Amino acid sequence: MKNFVEELRWRGMIQDIMPETEAHLMEDLRAAYVGIDPTADSLHIGHLVGVMMLRHFQNCGHKPYALVGGATGMIGDPSGKSVERNLLTEEVLAHNIAGIQKQLAKFLDFESEAANRAELVNNYDWTKGISFLSFIRDIGKHITVNYMMAKDSVKKRFDPNENTDGMSFTEFSYQLLQGFDFLHLYQEKGLTLQMGGSDQWGNITTGTELIRRIAGGKAYALTCPLITKADGTKFGKSEGGNVWLDPEKTSPYKFYQYWINTSDADAQRYIKIFTMLSKEEIEQLIAQHTEAPHLRLLQNKLAEELTVLVHGREELEKAQQASQILFGNATSNSLRSLDEKTFLEVFEGVPQAEVSHSEIAAGLDMVAILSGKTGFIGSNSEARRALKENSISINKEKVAEDYTVGEKDMIDGKFILLQRGKKNYFVVKVV
């Protein structure tokens, strides 16, 4: 049995841990869970810390459970929130859970016959038949209001300096429901450990308290730090919002770019948290990166490992090719291999102009497409001068003044890429 706690410790993935947890895990195969909020049909990279904890747990020989909160998702966890969120219908939750389960299978072994194969559970299954009266009688009486009010997630919502609207009884009951999940899984499946982000400590320890009071048992809690960025901006967000694992919500190219653009300080932390690379491999990478930071070895390895894990090797190669188009020595073939969505993402913010398909089909001379039809270059004489200087490319291939632009130059039947020098781009949209 590998030492799971030690594995997390050197990776910087432990914020709080109950005494004796490490010894408990070293004694035998144990079962633990992480709760996942099913408010969307995809995980985003903010979920990855918890998922990686489960992955390490399984890798160390233990049995991981992913709990999707079909019941608690209908309420909303107040932890880290300043306002109450919208509640979800059963139909939406079922759809979201199916999407999440498919993504989790990329990180955890659900299929093998191993004793520690992962399982996915939904707390709606064991709470849907419980009446309110039986819940407050059998569960609620064991936890005092004073105990619940002492939790940071609750106190924060009643703090006059936090600019909140207080808390509904629905949200106030959340920690009891989460605690009941832990009790149920302890009694029915022998789970003895719950893990989560550091903002979950109060909810998790409510569960350990219920297990002590109702079942007379001993359970454990472990939380990881909330991930932050060195510059103070929120981890897991790009300019377009969340960075999702679903390629329809965040393309593999954008996903890859998020990790490539990580700062040096963040990359050193993230490569420990979000990859399965060994301590020796990571220490060697950090040493190499320190010697030649301009090569961005850490960022490249981080982006490579995560893109392969989430999207596969083929999508990694496409993302790398797409990145080379703007920042490297890409060829016309790699440019033409882009689909429309990736093309537009690569050239987001690049000036565009529309030219009719009939004009392209008839053939346009270079001066016309550079100047008169697009305004990429200010005048015909400047366009001719740029062509004589051999600084103009169509779709990454140098052209001269006598070149005629036609349908053969259209990428995906819709675009033509003009370029002057190394970094000055212009997109012609064929309409």
Image: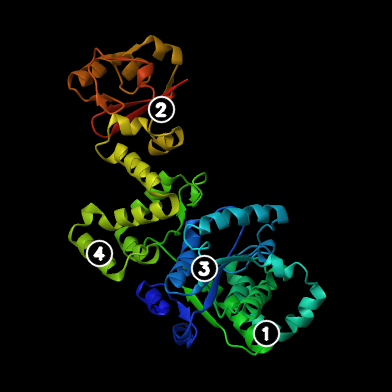
Mark 1, mark 3: which one is toward the viewer? 3
Whether 53 is drawn above or below 25: the answer is: above
Amino acid marked by disc 1: Asn
Mark earlier in primary sequence (2, 1)? 1
> Which mark is on residue 146?
1
Amino acid marked by disc 4: Ile
Amino acid marked by disc 2: Gln
Amino acid marked by disc 3: Arg
- Is 236 situated left or right of 316 in this image? right
Residue 53 makes an appearance in the image: yes
- Is 310 situated left or right of 377 in this image? right
Residue 261 makes an appearance in the image: no
Residue found 35% across the figure and 12% down from its top: 364
Whether 220 is drawn above or below 318: the answer is: below
Which residue lies under the disc numbered 4?
Answer: 286
On the image, the x and y values in percent for residue 175 come to 65, 74
Mark 4, mark 3: which one is toward the viewer? 3
Mark earlier in primary sequence (1, 3)? 3
Q: Residue furthest front?
A: 113
Query: Disc count in the image?
Result: 4
Per the model, the C-alpha gap separating discs 4 and 1 is 48 Å
Per the model, the C-alpha gap separating discs 1 and 3 is 40 Å
Residue found 42% across the figure and 64% down from its top: 228
Secondary structure at numbered mark 1: helix
Which residue lies under the disc numbered 2?
Answer: 352
Per the model, the C-alpha gap separating discs 4 and 3 is 33 Å
Per the model, the C-alpha gap separating discs 2 and 1 is 62 Å
Secondary structure at numbered mark 3: loop
Secondary structure at numbered mark 4: helix
Residue found 24% across the figure and 20% down from its top: 399
On the image, the x and y values in percent for residue 54 come to 48, 69
Query: Residue 317's image quarter?
Result: top left
